[in-house]
Image: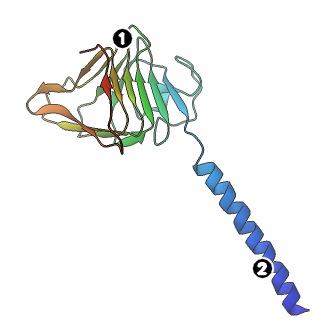
Amino acid sequence: MKASRIMNYFRKFCSCLVVTALFLFAFTSSKGANYYSRTSGGLWTNPATWSTVTYGNATNTGTYPQAGDNAYIGDGYIVYFNTNTTVANIFVGQGSSGELQFYNLAVYWLTVTGNITVYNGAKFRYTYNSTLTHQVYLSGDLTNNGEVDFYYDSNDLVNLTFQGATNSVVSGVGS
Protein backbone atom coordinates (compact mmCIF):
# COMPACT_ATOMS: atom_id res chain seq x y z
CA MET A 1 0.00 0.00 0.00
CA LYS A 2 2.78 2.45 0.83
CA ALA A 3 4.57 1.67 -2.44
CA SER A 4 1.45 2.39 -4.49
CA ARG A 5 0.93 5.70 -2.66
CA ILE A 6 4.52 6.69 -3.35
CA MET A 7 4.09 5.80 -7.04
CA ASN A 8 0.91 7.93 -7.23
CA TYR A 9 2.73 10.91 -5.70
CA PHE A 10 5.63 10.34 -8.09
CA ARG A 11 3.26 10.29 -11.12
CA LYS A 12 1.53 13.49 -9.97
CA PHE A 13 4.91 15.12 -9.41
CA CYS A 14 6.10 14.12 -12.90
CA SER A 15 2.84 15.35 -14.44
CA CYS A 16 3.30 18.69 -12.71
CA LEU A 17 6.87 18.90 -13.99
CA VAL A 18 5.75 18.21 -17.56
CA VAL A 19 2.97 20.83 -17.37
CA THR A 20 5.37 23.37 -15.85
CA ALA A 21 7.99 22.69 -18.52
CA LEU A 22 5.41 23.10 -21.30
CA PHE A 23 4.17 26.34 -19.76
CA LEU A 24 7.71 27.74 -19.46
CA PHE A 25 8.53 26.71 -23.02
CA ALA A 26 5.39 28.36 -24.36
CA PHE A 27 6.03 31.52 -22.33
CA THR A 28 9.70 31.91 -23.27
CA SER A 29 9.32 30.94 -26.91
CA SER A 30 6.45 33.30 -27.64
CA LYS A 31 6.99 36.07 -30.14
CA GLY A 32 8.18 39.40 -28.83
CA ALA A 33 6.15 42.56 -28.58
CA ASN A 34 5.91 45.46 -30.99
CA TYR A 35 7.01 48.81 -29.57
CA TYR A 36 6.04 52.08 -31.28
CA SER A 37 7.56 55.48 -30.55
CA ARG A 38 5.19 57.75 -28.68
CA THR A 39 7.32 60.75 -27.69
CA SER A 40 10.04 62.59 -29.55
CA GLY A 41 13.43 62.95 -27.90
CA GLY A 42 12.92 59.99 -25.58
CA LEU A 43 15.56 57.56 -24.39
CA TRP A 44 15.30 53.95 -25.60
CA THR A 45 15.24 52.66 -22.00
CA ASN A 46 12.42 54.96 -20.88
CA PRO A 47 9.07 53.13 -21.07
CA ALA A 48 7.39 56.52 -21.64
CA THR A 49 9.16 56.63 -25.03
CA TRP A 50 7.22 53.57 -26.23
CA SER A 51 3.70 52.34 -26.84
CA THR A 52 2.75 48.71 -27.23
CA VAL A 53 -0.36 49.66 -29.24
CA THR A 54 0.52 52.22 -31.93
CA TYR A 55 2.44 55.43 -32.56
CA GLY A 56 1.71 58.17 -30.02
CA ASN A 57 -0.50 55.97 -27.82
CA ALA A 58 0.18 56.01 -24.06
CA THR A 59 -0.42 52.26 -23.56
CA ASN A 60 2.77 50.46 -22.53
CA THR A 61 3.70 47.33 -20.60
CA GLY A 62 6.21 49.31 -18.52
CA THR A 63 9.21 48.23 -20.54
CA TYR A 64 11.13 49.06 -23.71
CA PRO A 65 12.21 46.99 -26.76
CA GLN A 66 14.44 44.07 -25.81
CA ALA A 67 15.21 40.52 -26.99
CA GLY A 68 12.63 39.24 -29.46
CA ASP A 69 10.85 42.60 -29.75
CA ASN A 70 10.33 44.84 -32.78
CA ALA A 71 11.03 48.58 -32.49
CA TYR A 72 9.15 51.05 -34.72
CA ILE A 73 10.25 54.69 -34.72
CA GLY A 74 7.58 56.66 -36.57
CA ASP A 75 7.61 59.85 -38.61
CA GLY A 76 8.29 62.89 -36.45
CA TYR A 77 9.87 60.92 -33.60
CA ILE A 78 13.50 60.83 -32.44
CA VAL A 79 14.61 58.02 -30.12
CA TYR A 80 18.03 58.07 -28.45
CA PHE A 81 19.63 54.64 -28.08
CA ASN A 82 21.19 54.48 -24.59
CA THR A 83 21.67 50.85 -23.58
CA ASN A 84 23.15 47.48 -24.54
CA THR A 85 20.42 45.20 -25.82
CA THR A 86 19.21 42.77 -28.45
CA VAL A 87 16.03 43.20 -30.51
CA ALA A 88 14.43 41.28 -33.37
CA ASN A 89 13.88 44.06 -35.93
CA ILE A 90 14.12 47.85 -36.17
CA PHE A 91 12.02 50.04 -38.45
CA VAL A 92 12.92 53.74 -38.61
CA GLY A 93 10.38 56.14 -40.13
CA GLN A 94 7.19 55.62 -42.06
CA GLY A 95 8.10 57.39 -45.29
CA SER A 96 8.92 61.00 -44.45
CA SER A 97 10.99 61.26 -41.23
CA GLY A 98 11.83 59.55 -37.94
CA GLU A 99 15.21 59.07 -36.32
CA LEU A 100 17.15 56.60 -34.20
CA GLN A 101 20.31 58.10 -32.81
CA PHE A 102 23.05 56.68 -30.57
CA TYR A 103 23.33 58.61 -27.31
CA ASN A 104 26.68 59.96 -26.11
CA LEU A 105 26.96 59.07 -22.40
CA ALA A 106 28.72 55.71 -22.77
CA VAL A 107 29.66 53.08 -25.33
CA TYR A 108 26.54 51.15 -26.39
CA TRP A 109 25.98 48.01 -28.46
CA LEU A 110 22.85 46.95 -30.30
CA THR A 111 22.29 43.43 -31.62
CA VAL A 112 19.54 42.97 -34.20
CA THR A 113 18.70 39.31 -34.85
CA GLY A 114 16.48 40.20 -37.81
CA ASN A 115 16.52 43.24 -40.09
CA ILE A 116 17.02 46.99 -39.94
CA THR A 117 14.83 49.08 -42.25
CA VAL A 118 15.32 52.83 -42.63
CA TYR A 119 12.48 54.37 -44.64
CA ASN A 120 12.53 57.40 -46.93
CA GLY A 121 13.30 60.58 -44.98
CA ALA A 122 14.32 58.67 -41.83
CA LYS A 123 17.75 58.59 -40.17
CA PHE A 124 19.77 56.10 -38.15
CA ARG A 125 22.93 57.85 -37.00
CA TYR A 126 25.48 59.07 -34.48
CA THR A 127 26.10 62.81 -34.26
CA TYR A 128 28.16 63.48 -31.15
CA ASN A 129 31.79 64.47 -30.67
CA SER A 130 32.43 62.51 -27.48
CA THR A 131 35.22 60.04 -28.39
CA LEU A 132 32.98 56.96 -28.33
CA THR A 133 32.76 53.97 -30.64
CA HIS A 134 29.43 52.13 -30.56
CA GLN A 135 28.54 48.72 -32.08
CA VAL A 136 25.68 47.38 -34.18
CA TYR A 137 25.59 43.62 -34.75
CA LEU A 138 23.18 42.66 -37.51
CA SER A 139 22.13 39.11 -38.37
CA GLY A 140 19.66 40.02 -41.10
CA ASP A 141 19.43 42.58 -43.88
CA LEU A 142 19.91 46.35 -43.94
CA THR A 143 17.47 48.28 -46.12
CA ASN A 144 18.30 51.97 -46.29
CA ASN A 145 16.01 54.32 -48.17
CA GLY A 146 16.80 57.23 -45.85
CA GLU A 147 20.10 58.01 -44.16
CA VAL A 148 22.43 55.73 -42.22
CA ASP A 149 25.37 57.77 -40.93
CA PHE A 150 27.53 56.07 -38.32
CA TYR A 151 30.58 58.32 -38.77
CA TYR A 152 31.03 61.68 -37.05
CA ASP A 153 34.84 61.70 -37.12
CA SER A 154 37.71 59.23 -36.69
CA ASN A 155 37.07 58.72 -32.96
CA ASP A 156 33.27 59.11 -32.93
CA LEU A 157 31.56 56.33 -34.85
CA VAL A 158 29.45 53.19 -34.90
CA ASN A 159 30.89 49.90 -36.15
CA LEU A 160 28.41 47.79 -38.12
CA THR A 161 29.13 44.05 -38.04
CA PHE A 162 27.12 41.55 -40.05
CA GLN A 163 27.02 38.28 -38.12
CA GLY A 164 24.23 36.16 -39.51
CA ALA A 165 24.45 32.51 -40.51
CA THR A 166 23.72 33.54 -44.10
CA ASN A 167 24.80 36.49 -46.21
CA SER A 168 23.09 39.76 -45.37
CA VAL A 169 21.71 41.98 -48.10
CA VAL A 170 22.38 45.72 -48.03
CA SER A 171 19.85 47.50 -50.25
CA GLY A 172 17.95 50.72 -50.77
CA VAL A 173 18.46 54.10 -52.39
CA GLY A 174 19.41 56.05 -49.24
CA SER A 175 22.72 57.59 -48.27
Q: Is residue 144 above or below residue 158?
A: above
Q: Is residue 65 left or right of residue 110?
A: right
Total marks shown come to 2
Q: Amino acid at mark 1?
A: Asn
Q: What percent of the width, then of the height, locates residue 93?
A: 41, 16
Q: Point out the image quarter for the N terminus.
A: bottom right
* Quarter of the view holding residue 132: top left
On the image, numbered disc 2 is attached to which residue? 10
Decide: few, some or many residues near mark 1? Use Cα within 10 Å; few <14, some 14-19, many ≥20: many
Residue at horizontal 69%, vertical 61%? Answer: 20
Label 1 vs 2, first from the N-terminus:
2
Q: Amino acid at mark 2?
A: Phe
**Local SS, label 1:** loop
Q: What percent of the width, then of the height, locates residue 117?
A: 38, 23
Which residue is most to the left?
154
Q: Is residue 43 visible?
A: no
**Which numbered dot is residue 24?**
none
Q: CA distance from mark 1 to mark 2?
A: 61 Å
Q: Point out the image quarter for the C terminus.
A: top left
Residue at horizontal 20%, vertical 23%? Answer: 127
* Quarter of the view holding residue 160: top left
Q: Is residue 166 left or right of residue 54?
A: left
Q: What percent of the width, then of the height, locates residue 123?
A: 31, 17
Q: Is residue 109 left or right of residue 27?
A: left
On the image, numbered disc 1 is attached to which residue? 120
Seen from the viewer's position, the closer of residues 21 and 128 is 21
